[in-house]
Image: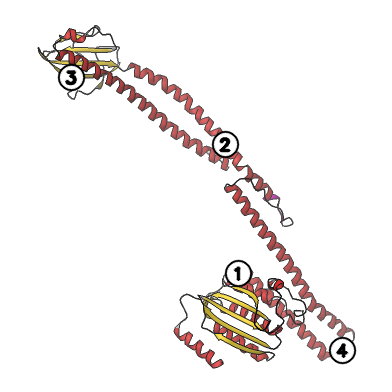
Amino acid sequence: MRRPATVRGRTTLLATGVVALALAVAGCAFVLLLQRTLTRNIDDTLAARADDVTALLAAGASPTQAMGSRRDDFYVQLVGPDQKVLASSSTEPESPLLTVPPSSGRPMTASDLPIGEEGEDFRVTSRTVQTPSGPTTLTLAASLEPVEQTLSAAVPQLLIGLPALLAVVGLTTWYMTGRALRPVSAIRRQLAAISSQDLAARVPEPPTRDEIAELARMMNGLLGRLEAAHAQQQRFIADASHELRGPLTTLRTKAEIAIAHPERTDWPHTTTTWLHEIERLCALVDDLLVLARTSDAPERRRDDVDLGDLLLLEVERLQERGSRRVEIGRVDVACVRGDRGALGRLLHNLGANADRHARGRVRLHLQAEDGVAVLDVDDDGPGIPVPDRERVFERFVRLDDTRTRSTGGSGLGLAIARELAAVHDGTLVVGTNEWGGARLRLRLPLQASGFPAYQASSAAAARKASR
C-alpha cells in the first residue's frame, strides 16, 4: 500500500492501524474470556450436583433415591464396579457414558458420547463414591451448546461493532488532525507570501499553548531577527557608500582641477591630498573587510594568547606616535583562548580610539581576576555621555564635536572591537575614569589550563624590561 503523502493521512492511517490491532486483540481476548467464564460456570454447577449426589449416597440412600426426581440439563449416571449402570437420568442410555473415567476427577471436554446429537461437545466430570454396596462411579455430563450459542451470538456483534468503531476512530482522527494542522496551513501560506520586500509581515499565532503556537512564535522571532538584520545591512550599505563617496569625490575634484589647469596646480599639495584620501579609502576598506569576516566567519583559529604581550605591543605603537603620554598600569599574565591577530586588532582599535580623543594622557591596565581578564583603556578626553555609550558601538557613528570625519576615523573602530570581543566570548563597555575621560573595559574569559611556564616567565620579563 502506498504511504500517504500528508501528515494528516499518515497520522490517520497510523492511529487507525494501532486501534485496529488493539481492537482485534481485545476482541479475541473477550471471546476467549467469555468462553472460559461460561465453561467455568458449567463446571461449578456440575461439581455442586455431584456433591449433592455424593452426600445422599454417603447417607445410605440407594442409587435411585440419590438420583432423585430433579429434571435439569445434566446427564447423571451411577456405574457399579462391574460396569453395570445402577441408575441414570431418564434420558441416559443403559451403557456407561465413559468407558475410562478421568483419573484426576477434573472436568474435561468430550465429544462423540452416546448422548445428544452427533458431534455435540460436553463437559464431563467423574468421581468414585463409596457406598454400602461398594465403590460406585458417579459421572455427570453437561452440553456445551449454550456456550456455543452465546459465542455465536457475540462474535457477529463484534465483527459488526468493531469495524464501526474503527471507522469512527479514523474519521475522528482525520477531523481532529486537520483541525490541529489548520494553523500550520495558515503559517505556510503566510510564509509563502513573505518576500525580501515585506519582511515586516508575521505568521498568525494560534491562541493556544501547544507546540504549533510555540513554533509560530519562534518563526515570528526569526522573522523579526531577519528584518532587523536586513535593515542593518541596508543601513550598512548606505553608510559605507556615503563614507566611500567622500574620499572619491575629493580625488575626482582634485583630478579634474589638475587636468583643467595644470599650470596653476600645486602638484606637491595635490599629490599629498590624493595620498591622504587614498589612505582613508584603504583604512575604510580594511575595516569593512574585518567586519565582513567577523560577521560571516565567526569561527576563528584558537590559540593560547597572552593579552599582556599584546598590550605591550600596543603601548609601544602608541609611544612611537609620540602624540600622547602613554602610561602602563598593572599588567598581569592573562592567557586567553582566541585568534592572536584578531585580538591584536581589538587592542589596536581601543588604543587608537583613546589616542585620538585624549588631551594628553592614555593609560592601559590589565588585571586577571575570578577567571576573567579585565583590560581597561583610559584617556583624559571629554568622555562619552551616558546616552551615547551604546550608540558609540554602532557602525559609522561619530559623536558630535569630538568625533568628526577628520578626527574620528571611519566610525568603525569601536564597532569592530565589540564584534571581535563577542567572537571571543567577551564584552566591551564604556565607562568613566578618575580623569573624567572615557574608559573602555574589555572582559575576556581566561584560559582554564593556564599559560606555559616558560611563556609566562618570558612575558613577565618583557613587561619588567618595558617598565
Q: Amino acid at mark 2?
A: Trp
Label disc, if present, on residue 265 of the rendered structure: 4
User: Do the numbered discs 3 and 2 sit on residues whose CB atoms are within 8 Å?
Assistant: no
Give the Cα distance between marks 4 and 3: 139 Å
Q: Compared to 404, does 465 lie above or below?
A: below
Give the Cα distance between marks 3 and 2: 61 Å
Residue 141 position in % (x across, y down): 25, 16
Say whether disc 4 or disc 1 marks the residue closer to the N-terminus: 4
User: Does any portion of residue 312 appear in the rendered image?
Assistant: no
Q: Compared to 192, does 31 lie above or below?
A: above
Mark 3, residue position: 127
Characterize the local packing of mark 4: few (<14), some (14-19) or many (20 or more) Cα atoms within 10 angstroms: some
Give the Cα distance between marks 1 and 2: 47 Å
User: Do the numbered discs 4 and 3 sit on residues whose CB atoms are within 8 Å?
Assistant: no
Q: Amino acid at mark 3?
A: Arg
Camera-side residue of 146 and 63: 63
User: Does any portion of residue 175 appear in the rendered image?
Assistant: yes
Mark 2, residue position: 174
Say whether disc 3 or disc 1 marks the residue closer to the N-terminus: 3
Residue 137 position in % (x across, y down): 16, 16
Give the Cα distance between marks 4 and 1: 47 Å
- 326 part of magenta stretch: no
Eye-nearest disc, 4 or 3:
3
Give the Cα distance between marks 3 and 1: 93 Å
Mark 1, residue position: 297
